[in-house]
Amino acid sequence: MKHVIFIVVLCIINVYGRVAVDVHHDDINLVAGVKPLTKNESIIKTHIDIENVDNAVQGNLIHVNISIAKKPCVTKTLLENIADNDSDDNNEFEPCAPEVKIDNGTALILTPLIKEGKVKEARKSARVDSKLFLGFKSYSGFLTVNETYNSNLFFWFFPVANKPLNSTPWIIWLQGGPGASSLTGLFDEIGPFTVINETLKRNPYSWLSNHSLLFIDNPVGTGYSFTEHEDGFAKDMATYSQHLYTALKQFLQMFPELRPAPLFLAGESYAGKYVPAMAMEIHKRKDKIGSDINLEGLIIGNAYVDPDMISHLAWPFYYFGLLEKEQIEIAKPLIDSFQQAINANNSSEAKNKWNSLVTVLLFLSHQKHAYNFLEDELVVGRYVNFLRTTPVKRAIHVGDIKFGWVNMTVNVKMAPDFLSTTKPMFERLLEHYKVLAYCGQLDLMLPCVFTSENYRTWKWNGSEEFLNATRFPYIFNSKLAG
């Protein structure tokens, strides 16, 4: 069983950008939607099936062994109807304690207010109590992107402090995955604060110092974003890009002062598809009446843009000295099968082979994750317990909506999109906008050599100048930084 759990965790690691890998028993209630045990329940060697539920790994993977020597409880009505109430047999039962309902507030759906023209009321309603968040001003809520299925995207916005919003650049951050919450970017990467030992701490490296920041849980179902229908999940680029554009238009009705400000779309890993797809939705409406989004550039980090970037997945493990040739040979049948699926443009099959191959390579190289092979642990996702607290839920207006730091239903639904490419989009967008592409050289999934070589194949009006440009070291505080 421990080997099954090990492989499951590895598979979870490999479906998104950088998110947490720790799984606790408490997570079962939140992630799998399994109700917590009441104090009088008795469960022995219970098997919890979390297949086909939101935020869950597909498959029967979690086994819990719990022994509670408590009497079983029944409702008062049932006790009254048990024959011979005075018999000693009834001592086996005791009345159930009433279920305590925690008031987490109500999920704030802002779209009805926006449609009615009550944008000031919507903005006021979205205001987050800054006292809970180290004094940082922010707004959060849900924007409906498909009324038929009641599909809603969750956002959390931080306006830059002490600078004019209408001229200060602002960033929309989209996490990878597919299915990883953008709140990972907020708490563990570029946001104004992080969680350390269950305590909120300032992030001295936050991009909020000179940008306004908007984090969106995308696609629908990711993080706090939700839908009420099976068909409300995105399955392709056309759907999630339209959802993002729809949300952005509503957001700008609430914050019209951001319209003239330079906008940058940013993200990492699978956001190498989200970012350009959203940019194209903005760009193709650029010259139309009512289009007032000042898109200036795109930012992508270790981004998955094209299947060519992942087709030789085993090479980094070999060239970094993590695996020998003999170990690569062990995985060769799977490597060949994966490449065949890519060549056949079979997205779902390629995704399954990719997951399996990553799992095997990490197992053979004794790596716990694939994003920095010098680190034993991937220290992210520490914010999840913080988000579970009632004061925080009420403050950010999510009510009883369940949060998942990585939603496997979203990941599975997006399988047909796995081999899509946004290379033609970047080639077109580069004619009009700036693009910053960065990479961490210790990342085994999308290492610099694969991403950089792919960028060199892009064709646009500045490609020749780009190929002939001199490579310079990046010096920060008199030290080599990149």
Image: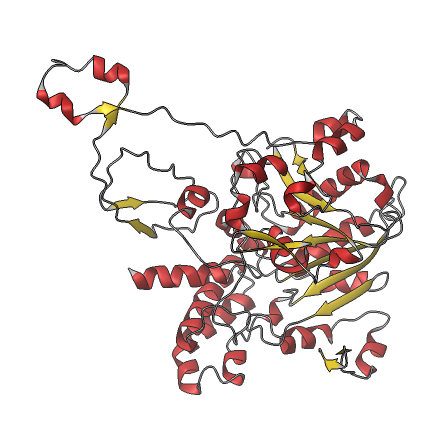
Relative to 85, does residue 468 appear above or below in the rendering?
Answer: below
Relative to 113, does residue 401 appear above or below in the rendering?
Answer: below
- Residue 226: x percent and y percent? 57, 39
Left or right: 19, with 476 as reference point: left
Left or right: 46, with 412 as reference point: left
Left or right: 220, with 261 as reference point: left
- Please name the colour scheme applied to the rendered image: secondary structure
The residue positioned 50% from the left and 61% from the top of the image is 351
The residue positioned 75% from the left and 71% from the top of the image is 458
Quadrant assignment for the N terminus: bottom left
Relative to 318, does residue 387 appear above or below in the rendering?
Answer: above
Image quarter for residue 475?
bottom right
Quadrant assignment for the C terminus: bottom right
The residue positioned 72% from the left and 43% from the top of the image is 138
- Residue 55: x percent and y percent? 48, 46
- Residue 404: x percent and y percent? 51, 47
